[in-house]
Each structure stands twice: as C-alpha cells, then as structure tokens.
Image: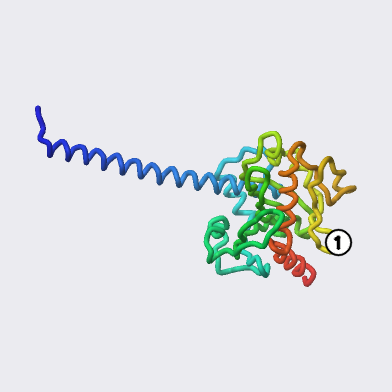
C-alpha cells in the first residue's frame, strides 16, 4: 500500500515528536537522580568527617538522610562579619552557584590557596550529640592542588580549635600521589591536631615528611609522599578557610558566645 508524501511527512514528524518528548523526560529524570546522588554524597561526607559515620560504612540513602537531618544543621553565615544570615534557606542554598553570581560573590584578594572568588554567604554545618549539645562545626574548604581545585570539608570541635577530621569530595589530583588526599589513613592523621595556636592564628601545617603524634606535634600533619604541590595546596586552603578571609570571623563569634555564656 502506498502512502502520500503528506502522510509520510506527518508520520515522521509524529515519531520525532514522541521520541523528543521521551528523551527530554529521560534527561529530566536523569538530572533529578544525579542531583539526588550529589546531595547524598555530600551528606555522607559530612557525616563521616564529623564522626557520625565510619569510612566505608554502608547505609541506605534513607538512613543517611535521617541521620543527617537529626544531627546536622546547615547554617548560613555572612563571611565578612561571621554573623548568621537568617534570610537565606541554608538547606537549599548553593554556595558554588553563588560563586558564579557577581551579585552574590566578590573577588578574593590574592592568596596562597588560589581562591579567586568568595561567596558573600557561606554554609557551615553544626553537628550536635544526642543530648543536643554542639559536638562539631564543619566548614567547606576549597583551593588549588597540582592539577585541580580540591573541594572538601574540615571538621572542628566545639572549641573551634581541635580538628576532628578532613575530607574531600571532589578533585582531579593524580591517583597514588596527590589523590592520596582520599586515603583514610592519611585523613586520620588530622584528628586531634590543632587548627589555631594560643593566639588564635591559623597554625596547622602540612609538612614534607612525617609529623609526630597529635600530642607531641599538634600543629603539623604528614605531607603526601611524592605530591609536594598538592600538600602545599592543602596546607594553604585549610589556613585560608579558617582565617579572616574565610570562616575565621564566624569561628571567632562562636568562641565569643561560649565565653559570654
């Protein structure tokens, strides 16, 4: 049976329309799934660095979300003053997206971490124990390594001085060298070190070679073997984000509130 040219064109157009709708729907569904996976990964990293989860522990997405929501509170902070910003929904605020908006970010002064822009508002995570007392403060950190920008979290104790942990959720450093920032053994060597000295100057350093124990050598952490530039990058980015340009003003406010209370 022969069909007219008009029929063929119409049929082809209909097939194309159906396919395009299917592809568009699949793309939206895939993006939603990808976004959910990103949120799950970030929540997992926060729970691990705070000590609420163990490295390699396998929890369902529902269990991760429940634990995160019951023990962790995201807080919006004005970086310049360290004051809380109650006008922003910290649970949905995207700090990385804000960096790309000139209205929501500023150019950073030249710095060793090679941070180019700063968000006017940053997100910190307050972690509380089962009694509701502040147990940890987690700040986002980022800066240049050898091949990439490293993005991660630093966990501090309620005194803002003792380091509870460090982790990175995104980077492109060389596997086996700078990529060892993901090694649980190396990350564990941060626990118990001190971020600030007695005068509250950022003093934690990543050195070349091996550091002593946290008790004997509280301000130094082992460098990454064969990854000098990545080690320097981690050193610089941690100092930057606990310093005055980063979350230093907020951490000072936390200490001040404790003194007043």
Quadrant placement of the C terminus: bottom right
Q: Residue at x 55, y 60 (%)?
A: 98
From this view, report whether residue 239 is shown above or below residue 29: below
Q: Quadrant of residue 135?
A: bottom right
Residue lying at the far right in this picture: please name it: 216
The x, y position of residue 230, in whole percent, is 71, 44
The x, y position of residue 259, in whole percent, is 80, 69
Q: Quadrant of residue 139?
A: bottom right
Q: Residue at x 79, y 58 (%)?
A: 202
Residue lying at the far top in this picture: please name it: 1
Q: How is the image coloured?
A: rainbow
Where disc 1 sits, the SS reads loop
**120 with respect to 222 (left or right):** left
Label 1 Cα neighbours within 10 Å, binned few <14 / some 14-19 / many ≥20: few
Quadrant placement of the N terminus: top left
Q: Residue at x 10, y 35 (%)?
A: 4
Look at mark 1 in the image and give the residue it sits on.
198
**Numbered marks: total:** 1
The x, y position of residue 195, in whole percent, is 79, 55
Residue lying at the far front in this picture: please name it: 110
Residue lying at the far bottom in this picture: please name it: 260
The x, y position of residue 73, in whole percent, is 62, 58
């Amino acid at each position: 049976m022969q069909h007219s040219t008009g029929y063929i064109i119409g049929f082809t157009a209909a097939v194309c329309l159906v396919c395009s709708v299917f592809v568009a729907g699949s793309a939206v569904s895939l993006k939603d799934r990808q976004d959910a996976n990103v949120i799950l990964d970030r929540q997992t990293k926060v729970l691990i660095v705070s000590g609420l989860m163990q490295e390699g522990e396998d929890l369902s997405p529902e269990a991760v979300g429940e634990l995160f929501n019951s023990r962790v509170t995201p807080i919006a902070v004005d970086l310049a003053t360290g004051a809380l910003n109650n006008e922003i929904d910290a649970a949905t605020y995207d700090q990385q997206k804000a960096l790309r908006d000139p209205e929501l970010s500023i150019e950073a002064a030249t710095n060793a971490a090679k941070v180019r822009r700063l968000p006017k508002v940053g997100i910190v995570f307050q972690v509380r124990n089962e009694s509701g007392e502040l147990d940890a403060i987690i700040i986002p950190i980022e800066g240049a390594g050898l091949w990439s920008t490293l993005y991660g979290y630093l966990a501090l104790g309620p005194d803002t001085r003792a380091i509870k942990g460090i982790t990175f959720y995104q980077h492109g450093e060389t596997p086996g060298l700078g990529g060892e920032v993901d090694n649980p053994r190396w990350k564990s060597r941060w626990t118990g070190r001190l971020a600030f000295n007695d005068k509250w100057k950022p003093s934690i350093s990543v050195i070349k070679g091996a550091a002593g124990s946290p008790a004997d050598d509280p301000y130094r952490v082992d460098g990454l073997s064969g990854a000098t530039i990545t080690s320097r990058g981690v050193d610089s980015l941690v100092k930057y984000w606990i310093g005055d340009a980063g979350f230093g003003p907020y951490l000072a406010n936390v200490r001040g509130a404790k003194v007043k209370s």
